[in-house]
């Protein structure tokens, strides 16, 4: 690769990182300044996720020829109902969303615990499924105990992540652009002597 091509690659990559960093910081500030809109957005995202999870679970129950537990079907139905409720009423409050997410996680985790215990004789890694289910139940209980704070904290965490990621992207972009400057390229490729 010629030094000109290398310089352009570093500069263009650095510019792309700078642009992505600015967008990420803007997203973080937007989330922080519009927490209600963020929560409504999270309602839609959660609803779509829960619907997809439930439909996949139910489809797997019916279309896989091997026998399945009724608990697998129950978990799928719970996810579908939770997703439909979230999408049908997007203006739901943060507290109601927290309770909905908490109840969903609690019901899903409980059904998965029963399912994991049923499969412990046939699967060697049933314990990893059980651990995932236990974490889901604990998450559900935590959010049910304090639903408003739980959902607002999630929006705050997302905003903080976006800003920090943006700062790191900008720092990386500046570093790449500096590495692509003509003096740095020539300094690294020049022969000592």
Image (cartoon, helix red, strand yellow):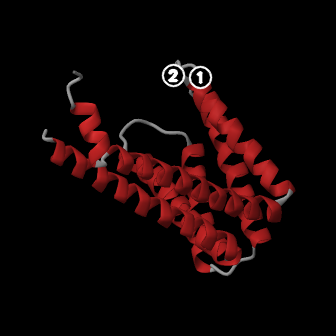
Point out the image quarter for the C terminus.
top left
Of residue 170 and residue 118, the one placed in the foreground of this image is: 170
Residue drawn at the location 65% of the way across and 49% of the way down:
108
Of residue 134 and residue 77, the one placed in the foreground of this image is: 134
Q: Position of residue 12 (x, y in %)?
A: 28, 56
Q: Position of residue 163 (x, y in %)?
A: 60, 59
For residue 69, which quarter of the picture? top right
Point out the image quarter for the N terminus.
top left
* CA gap, disc 1 and disc 2: 5 Å
- The reply, left or right, for residue 175 in relation to residue 84 is left
Q: Which mark is residue 120?
A: 1
Q: Are marks 1 and 2 in contact (CB under 8 Å)?
A: yes
Residue 130 vertical placement versus 124 (above, below):
below
Whether residue 23 is visible: yes
Mark 2: secondary structure: loop
Of residue 1 and residue 154, the one placed in the foreground of this image is: 1
- The reply, left or right, for residue 146 in relation to residue 88 is right
């Amino acid at each position: 690769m010629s030094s000109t091509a290398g310089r352009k690659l570093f500069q263009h990559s650095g510019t792309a990182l700078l642009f992505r960093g600015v967008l990420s910081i803007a997203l973080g500030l937007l989330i922080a300044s519009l927490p209600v809109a963020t929560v409504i957005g999270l309602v839609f995202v959660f609803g779509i996720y829960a619907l997809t999870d439930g439909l996949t679970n139910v489809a797997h129950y019916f279309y896989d020829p091997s026998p399945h537990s009724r608990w697998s079907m129950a978990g799928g139905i719970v996810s579908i109902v939770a997703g439909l409720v979230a999408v049908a009423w997007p203006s739901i409050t943060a507290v109601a969303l927290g309770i909905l997410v908490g109840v969903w996680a609690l019901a899903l985790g409980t059904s998965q615990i029963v399912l994991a215990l049923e499969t412990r004789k046939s699967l060697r890694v049933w314990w990893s499924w059980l651990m995932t289910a236990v974490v889901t139940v604990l998450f559900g209980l935590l959010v049910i105990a304090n639903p408003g704070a739980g959902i607002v904290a999630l929006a705050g965490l997302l905003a903080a992540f976006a800003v920090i990621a943006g700062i790191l992207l900008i720092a990386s972009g500046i570093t790449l652009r500096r590495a692509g400057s003509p003096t740095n390229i020539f300094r690294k490729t020049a022969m000592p002597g």
